[in-house]
Amino acid sequence: MTQKYLHLEMRGNVAVIRLARPAKRNALGDALILALRNQFENLPADAKAAVLCGEGDHFCAGLDLSELKERDAGQGLHHSRMWHAALERVQFGLVPVIAALHGAVVGGGLELASACHIRVADGSAFYALPEGSRGIFVGGGGAVRIPRLIGAARMTDMMLTGRVYNAEEGERIGLSQYLVPQGQAFDKALELASRVAENAPLTNYALMHALPRIAEQPADQGFFTEALMAAVAQSAPEAKSRVKDFLDGKASKVKKT
Ligand code: 1HE
């Protein structure tokens, strides 16, 4: 399924979803946000992981500022909640999502990247939250997700001062987990997604849906939820066959890199 400004292509069992509005730096208008929601709700049944990337010189310029018209408080609330609903489908959907980042990853573009499970950046990537200087605030879940990646102090600085982090700094502070040479983010993201797609489905489910909740729970509740999730995961036939393969010497060892 391909929608205006959003392309889907299957690469084996990996769904590649590409923001395709390069003339406007992949700015996220309402139509594109709704398309993202629709796409992540309706992934092909054979998709086991996804890569999210952007066409042109930038990953995403954030909110389409040309659509930022006068809204009253209620309309502003609903607009932000629409973003939340769409990005929740990315974070809490059916498959892990690897973001391939290059060029501008700014404003709502950083909010979108933050909803993904792994971020791979190339050397051209840069990160900013220009909301601060545009007189607005994040509204796509960034106030929740970005401090969990880099801490509230760094996000406050980005918004108050317009600070821009380059690709190396972004990796150092936790905006991306991988940094690759310019032009290689997509290939690395696809390689990782293909690897992730081979995991037992319940393991991927646990990492997407249980881990973020456990991380927010008080320790006592977190330990208990962890135990429940561990019991469910290890009871799956796939877990048993994978462990048996290792014990039979048929599965790969962990190797020092
Ligand atoms: C846009 C947008 C946009 C570009 N909305 N049209 N986001 C921002 O404040 C970032 C604003 N954009 C930029 O700072 C720059 O465009 C970039 C650094 C991303 C790219 O620079 P560059 O030199 O490659 O492109 P450009 O020449 O600035 O832009 C090319 C065209 O894209 C141009 O339109 P044209 O008709 O004159 O060709 C730009 O107007 C257009 N364009 N970015 C609309 N964002 C849920 S709340 C989230 C709140 C936010 O995200 S606020 C932050 C918004």
Image (spheres, helix red, strand yellow):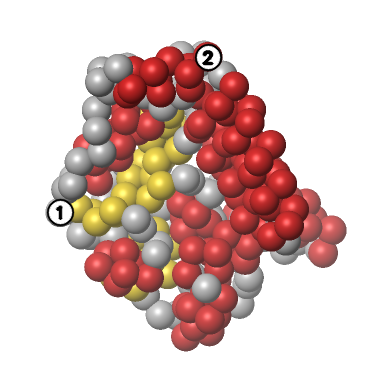
Residue bearing the label numbered 2: 237
User: Which residue corresponds to the image point at 84% horizontal and 58% vertical from the top-left?
Assistant: 74
Structural crowding at the residue carrying mark 2, measured as other residues with C-alpha within 10 Å and reported as few (<14), some (14–19) or many (≥20)? few
User: Which residue corresponds to the image point at 40% horizontal and 80% vertical from the top-left?
Assistant: 163
Q: Which mark is residue 18?
A: none
First-in-chain label (2 vs 1) = 1
Q: Amino acid at mark 2?
A: Pro
Residue bearing the label numbered 1: 181
With respect to residue 227, does 49 lie above or below? above
Which residue occupies the foreground of this view, 24 or 106? 106
Is disc 2 in contact with disc 1, using a CB cutoff of under 8 Å?
Answer: no
With respect to residue 70, does 90 lie above or below? above
Determine the residue located farthest toward the bottom in the rendered image: 161
**Residue 63 visible to an observer of this rendering:** yes
User: Which quadrant of the view contains residue 127?
Assistant: bottom left
Q: Report helix, strand or loop for mark 2.
A: helix
Q: Position of residue 123 (x, y in %)?
A: 20, 59
User: Which residue corresponds to the image point at 46% horizontal and 51% vertical from the top-left?
Assistant: 113
**Residue 62 visible to an observer of this rendering:** no
Which residue occupies the foreground of this view, 242 or 122? 242
Structural crowding at the residue carrying mark 1, measured as other residues with C-alpha within 10 Å and reported as few (<14), some (14–19) or many (≥20)? few
Which residue occupies the foreground of this view, 121 or 212? 212
Compared across the picture, whether 123 is left or right of 161 comes to: left
Q: Position of residue 206 (x, y in %)?
A: 57, 36
Q: Position of residue 142 (x, y in %)?
A: 58, 61
Q: Does the residue tagged 1 have its C-beta within 8 Å of any atom of ligand 1?
A: no
Determine the residue located farthest toward the front in the rendered image: 247
Q: Amino acid at mark 1?
A: Pro
Q: Report helix, strand or loop for mark 1.
A: loop
With respect to residue 143, does 42 lie above or below? above
User: Which quadrant of the view contains residue 76?
Assistant: bottom right
